[in-house]
Image (tube, rainbow, N blue to C red):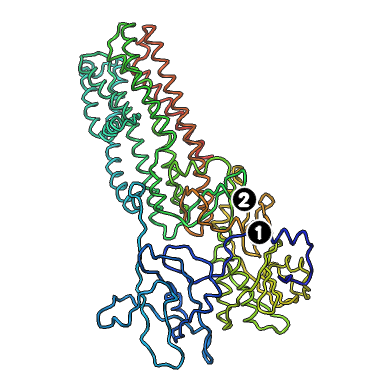
Amino acid sequence: MKEFGAREPEQPQKAKVEQSTRVLPGFTAPTIEMTQSFPAVKPDREKTEQTRPFSPVTQPKREIEQTRSFSVVGSPGDREERTPTPMAPSPAGESEHTRSFAPISEKAPTEADEDDVKVVRSLKDVKTKPPGRPKEPPIRIIVETIPEETDPKNKGEEPTELLRKTHKRLSGLLVRRVFLAADALLGMLLLLYSTRDWGFLPFLNSHGATISLLLLAVAMVPAFPVLWQGVKDLFRLRVSLYTLGTVCTAVCLAYSLSGADTVYAPLVTLQLFFLLQAIVNDNAAHFYTSKSVAAFRSPMGVCNAPQLLENTDSLRRNPGDVEDFMAKLSRSSLPEDLLCVYSSILLLLLPVLSYFLSKEGGLPYLQVWLLMLLGTVPYGAMLSFSKPFRILAKRLLRYGGALCGWHGARIFGGKHTIILRDGDLFPRKGIASNGMKIYHSYDAAKVISYALAALELTDSPLIGLFEELLREHYGKHSRVEDRRFYEQGGVGMEIGSDIVLVGNLGFMRSMGIHMPVGTRVRHAVYVSVNGELAGIFAIRYKANASTRTGLHDVLANRNFSIVLATRDFVITPELIAAKYTLPTDTMVFPDYSERLRLSATNPEQAMEQGALIAEDTFGAYAVTAAAGRTLGSTSLVLVALSLCAGIFGLLFCIVLIAWNSVAVASPMHIAAFQILWAAVTSFAGFVLLRF
C-alpha cells in the first residue's frame, strides 16, 4: 500500500499503527439501513458491482430517507444477512440530488394485481427495467416483521402500566398513612398520660388499657398492607420485618386480651406506622422512576463495560433497553436481603429464648415474647433502602434520569472510569459549519466527498454535516480503495489515483503538509490531496449547559475518572477547556486507535445497564451515575445502623429480664429507644444524601 502524505514516518511507528488500527471493529462503509433485527454486514464490492441497480425516478430527495429501509421476508430458517444494492449512477442530464427509490406501498396485494407483487428474500432479487423500455409498474415489496421470542418470566411491566398502578396504589397508601399516623399519635398520648399519672381525665385512668386495645384494632385497618405483606413473606419462606410486625401484632392482641396491666399496644401501632411508611416509600420510588422512563422517547442507557479497560470498570452511554430496565427494577436489594436474614433468625430464636427467660424470671410467656419483639425489631430498618431510593428517584426526575433500583446501585458502586464520546461532549444539534475554503483550483464537491469518505470510515459525528455540504454542491460519494488510521488523529486514504489525508491541524503538521499563511484554523477539518492542502472546513461547536453541569460534577467526584474516546478529529482537551471553562489536565486523551476502540459499539460486548437517561443530556448521565453510587453506600450504612439497634435492643432485653428488671423496659422507655435510633438513622441518611 502506498504511504499517505508527503513525509515518510518512522518505520517502528508505522508498524505499530498498522497493527493497532487494522484490527479495529466498526470501520465498514455505511450501508442502507435494514429494518430487520439482524446486524449489518460489510458490503461485498465484487457482488455489489454485479447487481443491477434501481432505475432512477424523479422523486424529491426528501423521500429517500423514507423509502430506503427494507425488511427481509421468509421463514426464520431462511433469514440471512444480505448486502444492499448500491444506487446506480445518474444518467446524463439528471442531477445526483434528485435520485431516489420508488416509494414502498403499504397496501396489501389483491388478486387483480398479483402479477405486480414480488416477495423477495434479498434486495438482489429486485429486477429493474433497462433504459429505453416501456415503463413498468413499480415493484412493491412485502414487509414482514418477525417478532423476537422473549421469556415472559424475565419481562417486566411496561413503564406506563407501572406508572398507572403505582399512582393508584400510592393514592390509597397516603390516605392509610394519615389515619394510621393519627391513631399512633393518640396511642402515644394515651401512653404518656398513663405514665405521668395525670388525673385530669379520670375516665382514661380506669379504661386506658381498653382504649389502647381498641386503637390497635382500628389501626389494623389502615395497616392492612403491612399485615398482608407479612403473611405473604411468611408463606414465600422469605421472612421480613413485615412478618415480625404481623407476629408482634398478634402477640400483643393475645397478651392484651389476657387481662394484662402493662399496655404495649401504642408501641405496636407505632411499629406498624414505620412499616407502612416503608411501603409508601417503595411505591413512590417506583412511581417517580416509571414516570421518568415513560417520558423518554429515545432513552440512552448508562452501562458498565468492564472489558473495555484493564483493572477498572468503565461507564459509557449506549442505546437504552427499556424492557431490560423494567425487568430488573424490582429486584431485591442487599439491605433487604440482610434484613430478611436477621428477621428469619429472630423468628426462630425469640420464641425459644422467651420461653427460657420466662421460666427463669417467672414472667408471663407472652409478655416476654412481646417485649423481645418490640425491642429487637428496629422501627426505621425498612426505610434503609426505600427512603433513599425515593429521594434520589424524585431528584433524578428533574434531570431526566432513572436509576434501576439496587441493580443500578450495584453497578455504579465503587470507582469507575467514565468514557466520554462525541455526543456526550457536543450533541449534534450544537455542531454547525463555520465556512470552508478550497485551494489549488480543486473542485469543492470533490474535496467535500473526500472528507466525507474519511468521516464515514471513522463513523464521525460530522457525517451529517458534510452530507449536507455534499448535497448543496451536487457531489457524489467517493469509494475508498485503501485506508490507514494515524495515532496523531487523522486518516489516510487511496481514492482512485489520489492519495488523501484528512485530519486536524496537528495531524497535517506531523505529516509535513505545507500550510499557507492564514490557514491555521484550530477548530477545522483539513483535507490534503497528493501532498498539498486542498481544503479547510471550519466547525463551530456550541457548549451544552447539561454537559457543563455533568462535567463539573464528575470532576468534583474522586470516584470517577474521565477518558476521552472521541472520533471527531477536532474535539481535543483544549477545545473542551475553551468551551466549558474547566480544567482538563485530569482527563485521559489516548491515541486515536485507542479512542476508536473505546467508542466502538460492539454487540458482543457484555454490558450491564444500570440506568436510563434522556437523549443528549450528559448532565443526567453524571448525576444518575453519582446517584447510583450514593444509593448503594447510603443504604448499607443505614442498614448497618439499624442492625446495630436491633442487636443492642436484643441484649438490652435479655439483661433486664434476666435481672428481673422488666420495669426498666417500660413501654415508654422502649418507645424512646426506638424513636431515638430511627432519628439517628434518618439524620445519617440526610447527611449522606445531601453531601
Classify 506 as above or below 661: below
Image quarter of residue 341: top left
Mark 1 and mark 2: Cα distance apart in space: 17 Å
Residue 131 position in % (x across, y down): 46, 91
Q: Earlier in the sequence, mark 1 or mark 2?
A: 2
Q: Give the residue displayed 44% in from the left and 19% down from the top.
A: 648
Please name the amino acid that badge 1 sits on: Ser
In this rendering, position of residue 17 left or right of residue 66 = right
Mark 1 highlights which residue? 593
Quarter of the image for the N terminus: give it.
bottom right
In this rendering, position of residue 574 left or right of residue 431 = right
Please name the amino acid that badge 2 sits on: Ile
Callout 2: SS: strand
Classify 681 as above or below 86: above
Q: Nearer the viewer, residue 207 or 641?
A: 641
Classify 497 as above or below 639: below
Q: Nearer the viewer, residue 670 or 119?
A: 119
Mark 2 highlights which residue? 562
Q: Give the residue displayed 61% in from the left and 48% down from the top.
A: 309
